[in-house]
Amino acid sequence: MSASAPLRAVVCGTNFGRFYIDAVQRHPGFTLAGILSTGSRYSRELAEGHGVPCHTSPEELPDDIDAAFVAVPAAVMGGRGSELTCTLLDRGVHVLQEHPMHPDELSESLRRARRANRQFHVNTHYPHVAPVREFIEAATRLRERQRVLFVDAAAPVHVLAPLIDILARALGGTRPWRLGDPAPLPEDVVAAANGEAPLRLLHGAIAGAPLTLRVQNQIHPGDRDNHSLFWHRVAVGTEGGVLTLADTHGPVLWHPRMHSPRDSGHRLVFTPEPGAEALRLPASAILGQAGPPPRICDIFSELWPAAIGEALDKFAAAIAAGADPLRSAQHDLAVFALWRDLMARLGPPELIRPADPEPLAPSALTSGAAPTEQAAGPRVGSPRSGPVLPGEPTRPPAAQLSDYNEAAEFFDLGAREHTARTGPAVVACLNGIDPQAGPLVDIGAGSGLVTRQVASAYPDSHLIATEPAAGMRALLTARVGDDPELARRVTVLPHTAEELLEPGALPERISGAVLCGVLGHLEPDLRHELLRELVRRLAPGAPIVVELTGMREPTTIPPTLLRHSELGDQRYEWWMAGEPDGPDRMRLDTTWRVFRKGGPVREVREQYRWYTLELEQLAKESGLHLTPAPAPHAASVPYLGTLAASGNGVVTT
């Protein structure tokens, strides 16, 4: 096997293991070589569907297996996962095992890995979930500036080990740590609560910070994953404010400290005058979320697979580095030592067998909601549902919608961070284009942030960048004109989508097309016609790269701060709000607010229409096959994909 060849991997277990199967198939460092299970009909059919053998014992595995992903409960949970891990390590197979593990199991696996000169990692999974990663990174930056004054955390008992791992990563370790026993439950309190007490409370310290911990110490013996009242919740407090992970799956919130200085008469200052500039801070802000919040189904289709991909990245890097597994696992050993102490103090969980819950949609909690409305919650990342704040402008008729001109001066301040992710993803999706087949067309190129990245990545290509908004087009032209090489190869046109359909507007043959944040603005009939026109002009195998927003159905978006920037002594804030405008359409309000030391300077509002749709819908409309952005971009830009004809060598879905 060459050094660059993918590692042949087997996935053990077909419950949570299904996520590993999908992750292995997407990861360039591994290739799925088999499934190891009890041999149930489901497992055999799953293996057959993936074109790999289904093994029922490790002895059946061929000798060329390089790595194994053990998604089978460990002995501490009553399973054979750790036994299986030891067998695989003894056979010279690198192993990544799902949590939790008793520290003794972990130590034994690490010793065997060292003897076999192989890697062993335990995966607590949830620290790799995107909102948790955002929280950990923000907590690290917060600790660099201020001392942690308290930590408040909560989790159900079956995912306590990942909670400890999240805390350790956020706080820079576990030591020094101490845990107290759970607070006793007074009998009269339990009686007043109808005999129910789902949460246990205990106090302690972790990484030297005071810790308050609440645990749902209850488990359904036949369905432990489906009856948690909540998931991981963590708040880290400093003198400057409180950083909160509201849930494992987001959002991450920042609440600055509410503090007002006093004037010479010892009266509280209520206006952001000199010396009280902090009063201009937003009372709360969502960190890192670039779109609406995930639906529950998106956790399984997007967040968790991406998290496992992160774990596979680290595992592949460790295999390549060949580090001592025992030395590199000190963090894990500390985490599971603390977890063992915590579990011993909590005692056996209460066994419960409740009926299936009835999840409620956010609209059920707002005025005027139909009492029968259930579980049709907003799409991922669609900011939280709720009423539009008083004073928001009324929605204009379609003829009065904005054209990006008014806000053009602010566009790069808000979009630069986003296009730093989408640009490389677009470049990757265009891999393999034939510059000789015709120019590459970037429709709705905006200020050219992505156009410049694409043009730089493909120096043999000529580009046509279309942008109808004069303000945006001025930025685009300046960006292209600043680089003599780009100026030679990029043609800027003022065409609207309708004008692109006119004879002669586009070349007869193009090597590809890019439409980032464009198609949702178009009426469905115009969208269909534009897609058909592009398909007709595509060279054989040429791609159409499309980016959407993730808003899959209309929902209410309350005013939400998306970005803020500082230029000189001015602060710029980008706000967005929205509401349904029909069965498949939304009206979006964007507001740019400019502040100076004395307070607000000016405000620019624009309003747009956006048709809610998904990439799969565009594939059907165009008759092309859809491929997600390649790793590692799929996790950071889940609403971007490639449409191309079949038979072009691209793996399609």
Image (tube, grey):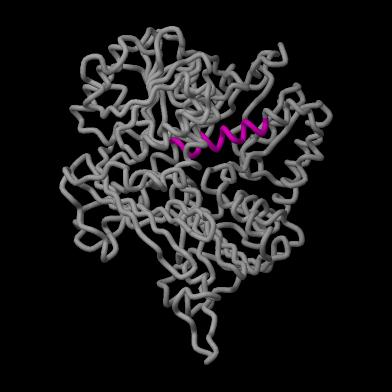
Residue 173 % position (x, y): 72, 54
Residue 629 % position (x, y): 47, 26
| Vertical placement of residue 221 versus 521, above or below | below
- As rendered, which of 414 and 370 lies closer to the eye? 414
- Residue 304: in magenta span: yes
- As rendered, which of 171 and 101 lies closer to the eye? 171
Q: Residue furthest bottom?
A: 265
User: Is 68 on the left-hand or right-hand side of 549?
Assistant: right
The answer to whether residue 559 of the structure is visible from this angle is: yes
| Vertical placement of residue 564 versus 26, above or below | below
The answer to whether residue 39 of the structure is visible from this angle is: no
Quadrant housing residue 437: top left
Give the residue at x 66% y 19%: 7
Residue 444 % position (x, y): 34, 31
| Vertical placement of residue 568 versus 598, above or below | above
Q: Residue furthest right?
A: 115
The quadrant of the rendering that contains the N terminus is: top right
Q: Which residues are magenta?
A: 301-315
Give the residue at x 55% y 59%: 234
Residue 487 % position (x, y): 47, 23
Give the residue at x 56% y 21%: 35
- As rendered, which of 236 and 418 lies closer to the eye? 418
The quadrant of the rendering that contains the C terminus is: top left
- Residue 24: in magenta span: no
Classified by dominant secondary structure, the portion drawn in magenta counts as: helix
